[in-house]
Amino acid sequence: MKTLKKLLKSYTFNILLVVIFTGFVLWLTLKDNYKEILSMLASANLGWLLVIPLLAILYQVIIGWILRKLTLLSNPHYKLSQGIVNAFVASFFHGVTPSASGGQFAQVYIFKKQGVRISDSASILWMDFIIYQATMVASVFVLLLLKFTYFYQHYSQFFILVLVGFCVNGAVIIGLWALATFPRIYTWLSTKGLLIGAKLHIVKDKEKALNNLNIQLERFGSEIKKLKNHRKTIIQVLIANSIRLLLYYSIPYFCALALNIQVDSSYILDILALSSFVSMINCFIPIPGASGGTEATFILMFSTIFGSIAASSIMILWRIATYYFVMILGGLTFIYAKAKPDLVE
């Protein structure tokens, strides 16, 4: 059992898992139509091929800008370059740990090297989580409202998972807000709620669970109060997160353009929605980088618009740009950051 836990904590083992699952999915993707897919990739438009990784980099730059805006509240000399370094390192550790669990620990480490106190970095990451989670849930809610009937009819086998993913993500932010705002809800959860959880064997240690709940609520309430005093920053970060998500959700569209696939303007909203749905389903894939499941889900969803061959080709470009390319840059950035005794310029 101890050996298994050590393996799960090993980045080398996690990267190996990513390679194995990705290789298996690529084999499934290419085994029947490899000639057509490789031909489509070989004839890709070079100009659009160059645009796609630039969009992936821009996505990380926006995250770096968001981190800088939030860090400036407590560290007025924090620079954009430092925020970008932090963003790339976080993406690398999100990608090589199960359920993206290692990113924030890496960010705290980088913040510390950049001269930001651990208490401040924890506050920054909480604010980032609150605003991002709220923006993401709101954006997916809008896309669901706009295309609910169509996607329910055409993607019924996946739509339940999408709705569950949306509910889980929405429940996190709404639940924390409700617990921090309404004392009666907290009282019920801390007494009867934990008792029910213990009887269902969901909660093993009631005291420990209550202590964790109190810590999370205290942090959440503290950051909400802090954000209320910086409304201009909230608005700026909300807008930046909206642009960030729009950019990420639109990358499959640019991949289609790179492969010389004509995309009718009426499908742009569908592409944005499908990209957000893939992200929702990824919440249920605990493998590092959600490898295997991400690729399979993407092909199954996007094949209804583009067909299986085109969807498979788009997936390969999309996955390389948004995951592997960013992972490589993030790993190199971490090596650079770790080697520097002090990143404060």
Image (cartoon, rainbow, N blue to C red):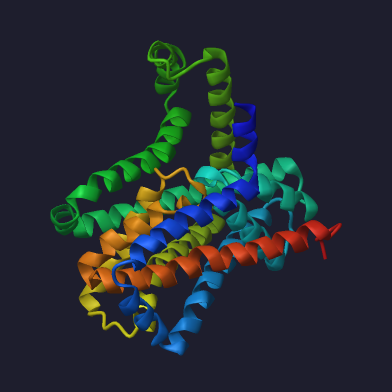
> In the image, is residue 103 above or below residue 44?
above
Across and down, in percent, residue 61 comes to 59, 68
Q: Quadrant of the C terminus?
A: bottom right
Q: Quadrant of residue 312?
A: bottom left
From the viewer's perspective, tell me whether residue 72 is left or right of residue 272. right
Residue closer to the observer: 247 or 39 = 39
User: From this viewpoint, is residue 342 visible?
Assistant: yes
Say how many tags the image has.
0
User: From this viewpoint, is residue 77 visible?
Assistant: no
> In the image, is residue 91 above or below residue 191?
below
> In the image, is residue 234 above or below residue 9?
below
Residue closer to the observer: 119 or 228 = 119
Q: Residue at x 65, y 57 (%)?
A: 89
Across and down, in percent, residue 211 comes to 58, 20
Q: Residue at x 25, y 68 (%)?
A: 308
Q: Residue at x 50, y 15 (%)?
A: 204
Q: Residue at x 44, y 28 (%)?
A: 179
Across and down, in percent, residue 24 comes to 42, 57
Q: Quadrant of the N terminus?
A: top right
Residue closer to the observer: 200 or 32 = 32
From the viewer's perspective, tell me whether residue 54 is left or right of residue 261. right
